[in-house]
């Protein structure tokens, strides 16, 4: 069975290590915070200006001056700090943030990513995504393997305007965990009950399958 | 002490004119200069260029200026959540320049700090880089971005004193500090204006030298864009 959005987040949470500062994008990436192990210390950064972001506030405790980059009301955990946007992106460009998890509309086999614009249709802007993907050493993309029309989102070349070039290293989809090495998608793990052939069929770009492909474990 | 206080929002906005470029602080609706935006709407200033991370929502924030067609051009990083904005952009009524969020912040800070241009990796290889100078540093490609030039910076802080010193609260800080001193004239509106000496100098986020005019806002709605809460057990 293909993974749910929660399960994609749960699998990505395993990549979050003790001592990491992590930036989570909007959508599936936001859910990752719910699945990080309790016995490790991690701080979440939101690029609008907080480190040490906590869960949503209890009803009635919401503060309009305390939101995340998705404009949702949040809380600050003990040890949190606030800062301005220039410093926030200094942290990001300066590679002080250890892991960036974000969504995508398309990823190409050389690690290009597109996630901010569909010409003539949807123009919301890149927000902080271009700064994040251009600077982060460690980027994981969380997305569905195919779009609503059933077309592959893992392509030879992106068709949409790019957000960044040669930057994505790892992708977790509803079907598989993949790594980008030397301009090709390498299949690492498959969703329980999903065959290598099914993943192959849903992947337009070059897919390398080496040896036994294990099922994703949580 | 050099006094920066003005009586009200009308006095604070003296000198604004059609065709000017304004910087406005805020992220979404958080930390926006609400009182100044109302004044811009009231004075019906036309053909303005706005440098602001977002464009408000349909009936609040910069959305109020949009509705009255006062904005000629927006320079922003993210403009979702505003149907009227999308309509004016797609129909070509309004010019829009979308730029990476970190670049937006740095172009403000550079303007404040006397740095005419800088190199950033953000946007390299994308349409953001079109027509811009590129250069390699440490084996990585960067694009040259220039400091903004603006007539006015409009910012909002939590507390301020007569000398123009500012303290921000929570994530309402966002783009406000980088815009202080980045425009030719910086106007700060604050929730609480106190006499000089009442703010601890150790706690001041932005020194008054960057501020030309400061006033206490009449009222703050502080609208929440996405209310997300947990149930109490």
Image (tube, coloured by chain):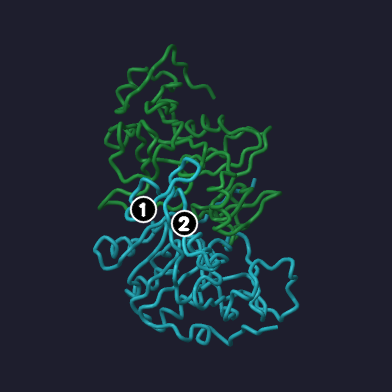
The vertical placement of B15 against B90, above or below, is below
Q: Position of residue B186 (x, y in %)?
A: 53, 76
The vertical placement of B152 against A162, above or below, is below
At x 54% / y 48%, what residue is drawn? Answer: A92
* Label whose residue precedes the other's in the sequence (1 or 2): 2
* Of the pair A92 and A75, the residue shown nearer to us: A92
Q: Can residue B222 be seen in this view?
A: no
Chain letter for mark 2, please: B
Q: What element carries label 2?
A: helix
The vertical placement of A29 against A1, above or below, is below
Among the chains, which one is cyan? B
Q: Tell me if label 1 and label 2 are in contact, CB under 8 Å.
A: yes
Q: Residue B103 carries which label?
A: 2
| C-alpha gap between disc 1 and disc 2 | 11 Å
At x 32% / y 71%, what residue is drawn? Answer: B72
Q: Where is residue A180 in the image (x, y as percent from the top left)?
A: 42, 28
Chain letter for mark 1, please: B
At x 43% / y 67%, what residue is drawn? Answer: B51
| Quarter-of-image position of residue A125 | bottom left
Please identify the quadrant where the C terminus of chain B is shown. Answer: top right
Q: Is mark 1 on a helix, strand or loop?
A: helix
Mark 1 closeness class: few <14, some 14–19, many ≥20 residues within 10 Å: some
Q: Is residue B32 left or right of residue B158?
A: left
Q: Which mark is residue B128?
A: 1
Among the chains, which one is green? A
The vertical placement of A131 against B5, above or below, is above
At x 60% / y 35%, what residue is drawn? Answer: A36
* Of the pair B225 and A190, the residue shown nearer to us: A190
Q: Position of residue B7 (x, y in %)?
A: 58, 87
Mark 2 closeness class: few <14, some 14–19, many ≥20 residues within 10 Å: many
């Amino acid at each position: 069975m293909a993974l749910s959005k929660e399960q994609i987040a749960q699998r990505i949470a395993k990549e979050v290590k003790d001592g990491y500062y992590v930036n989570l994008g909007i959508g599936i990436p936001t859910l990752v915070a719910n699945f990080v192990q309790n016995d490790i210390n991690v701080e979440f950064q939101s690029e609008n200006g907080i480190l040490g972001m906590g869960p949503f506030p209890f009803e009635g405790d919401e503060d309009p001056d305390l939101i995340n980059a998705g404009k949702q009301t949040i809380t600050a955990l003990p040890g949190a700090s606030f800062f301005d946007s220039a410093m926030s992106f200094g942290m990001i460009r300066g590679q002080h943030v250890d892991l960036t998890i974000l969504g995508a509309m398309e990823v190409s086999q050389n690690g290009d990513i597109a996630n901010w614009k569909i010409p003539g249709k949807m123009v919301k802007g890149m927000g902080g995504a271009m700064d994040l993907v251009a600077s982060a050493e460690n980027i994981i993309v969380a997305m569905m393997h195919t779009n609503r029309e059933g077309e592959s989102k893992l392509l030879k070349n992106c068709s949409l305007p790019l957000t960044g070039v040669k930057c994505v290293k790892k992708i977790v989809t509803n079907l598989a965990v993949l790594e980008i090495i030397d301009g090709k998608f390498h299949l690492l793990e498959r969703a329980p009950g999903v065959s290598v052939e099914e993943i192959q069929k849903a992947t337009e770009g070059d897919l390398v399958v080496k040896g036994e492909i294990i099922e994703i474990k949580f | 002490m050099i006094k920066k206080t003005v009586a009200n929002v009308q006095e604070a906005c003296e000198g604004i004119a059609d065709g000017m470029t304004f910087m406005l602080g805020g992220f979404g609706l958080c930390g926006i200069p609400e009182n100044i935006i109302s004044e811009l709407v009231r004075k019906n200033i036309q053909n303005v260029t706005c440098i602001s991370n977002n464009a408000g929502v349909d009936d609040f924030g910069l959305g109020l200026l949009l509705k009255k067609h006062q904005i000629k051009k927006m320079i922003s990083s993210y403009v979702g959540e505003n149907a009227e904005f999308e309509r004016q952009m797609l129909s070509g009524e309004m010019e829009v320049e979308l730029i990476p969020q970190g670049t937006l912040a740095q172009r403000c800070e550079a303007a404040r700090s006397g740095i005419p241009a800088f190199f950033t990796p953000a946007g390299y290889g994308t349409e953001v880089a079109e027509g811009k100078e590129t250069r390699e540093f440490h084996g990585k490609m960067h694009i040259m971005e220039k400091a903004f030039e603006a007539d006015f910076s409009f910012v909002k802080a939590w507390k301020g004193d007569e000398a123009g010193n500012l303290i921000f609260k929570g994530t309402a800080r966002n783009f406000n500090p980088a815009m202080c001193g980045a425009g030719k004239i910086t106007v700060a509106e604050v929730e609480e204006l106190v006499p000089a000496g009442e703010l601890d100098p150790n706690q001041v986020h932005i020194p008054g030298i960057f501020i030309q005019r400061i006033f206490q806002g009449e009222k703050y709605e502080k609208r929440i864009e996405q209310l997300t809460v947990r149930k109490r057990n």
